[in-house]
Amino acid sequence: MAQNVNSYTINGTNIVIKGMTCLFYVAYCVLISCKHSKSSHYDCITLKLNDVELFLLLYSVKNLFFERLDGAVDLFVCTVGDYVRIRTDDPKIPTSVAQVESLDVERQMVRIRWYYLPEETKQGRRTFHGIKEVLLSNHYDVRSIHTIQGKCVVYSLENYMNLKPIGADDYFCRFEYNCVEKCVVDGFVDVECDCEMPYNPDLFMVQCDGCMCRFHPSCKGMKDKDAMGLTKFLCSKKCSDDDAKCSDDDAKCSDDDAK
Ligand SMILES: [Zn+2]
Ligand SMILES: [Zn+2]
């Protein structure tokens, strides 16, 4: 009989080791080294041990900068509603993102709802897709609890853009994907620039000082680095003509330009 629970502690693999875990380990290594250096006789064995510890110390310091440590094992509590990284059998996409729907401890199974990567959809990855973009699918699945590698977070695009910094396990979702019809579910999404594309948070855009609209430098015949150096940018002759008026009537200028 299925035994569904809300939370379950999982022995994950390939878990991100960050900040505190690593600091404790560094502190432990320093303590061990101090203990050995107080030893009255410095024989070869002690020196060799200290070398190993020094290596471990440097290695853990390195891990402070390299977030993911492959093969590390860590315990974490998985709860219904959590976003998780799941190990897949596909070598091209070894890890996928999903949301936990229910946990069956007795059978050690988890029911999940998959998030698709843009390249997993029929339409494929487009230029407006962000590197960390995922699409909420209507594809539900049952997997072994042990395929859960760790937790992650799927944000709205707006909240994702406010993250500082964006972590390895942070994703965003703004589209739903119907995997039966093989299409993106119709929904309203803002488009920007002359190319009328949805916003890609990974692409630099330059903002017009007249109408405040954003543009890809390439769509305006500029290189990114040139656009970054601009102190003032006006998207069109109309914006430059209206520039004086803009300061008096910003709302009017934006309305005019939106058309
Ligand atoms: Zn553009
Ligand atoms: Zn403008």
Image (tube, helix red, strand yellow):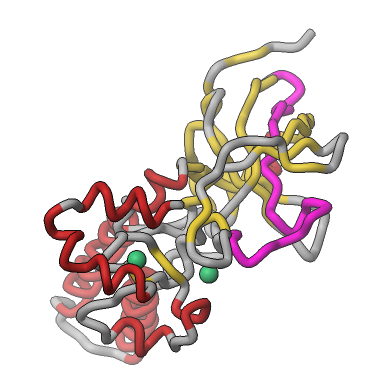
Q: Point out residue 219 in the picture as x, y percentages from the top left corner.
A: 52, 77
Which residue reaches farthest right? 180
Q: Is residue 119 magenta?
A: yes
Q: Residue at x 56, y 23 (%)?
A: 80
**How many numbered discs?**
0
Q: Point out residue 20 in the picture as x, y percentages from the top left corner.
A: 28, 54
* Left or right placement of residue 35 versus residue 12 in this view: left
Q: Point out residue 155 in the picture as x, y percentages from the top left corner.
A: 46, 42
Q: Splitting the image into 4 quarters, where does residue 224 fall?
A: bottom left
Q: Splitting the image into 4 quarters, where does residue 100 fall?
A: top right
- Please tell me whether residue 185 is drawn above or below residue 64 in the rendered image: above
Q: Residue at x 48, y 38 (%)?
A: 76
Q: Splitting the image into 4 quarters, where does residue 239 fall?
A: bottom left
Q: Nearer the viewer, residue 215 or 58?
A: 215
Range of magenta residues = 106-129
Q: Is residue 4 magenta?
A: no
* Left or right placement of residue 178 versus residue 35 in this view: right
- Please tell me whether residue 204 is drawn above or below residue 129 in the rendered image: below
Q: Is residue 11 visible?
A: no
Q: Nearer the viewer, residue 99 or 37?
A: 99
* Left or right placement of residue 241 versus residue 172 in this view: left
Q: Point out residue 254 in the picture as x, y percentages from the top left corner.
A: 32, 53
Q: Nearer the viewer, residue 183 or 76?
A: 183
- Please tell me whether residue 187 is drawn above or below residue 89 in the rendered image: above
Q: Is residue 158 visible?
A: yes
Q: Residue at x 35, y 83 (%)?
A: 227
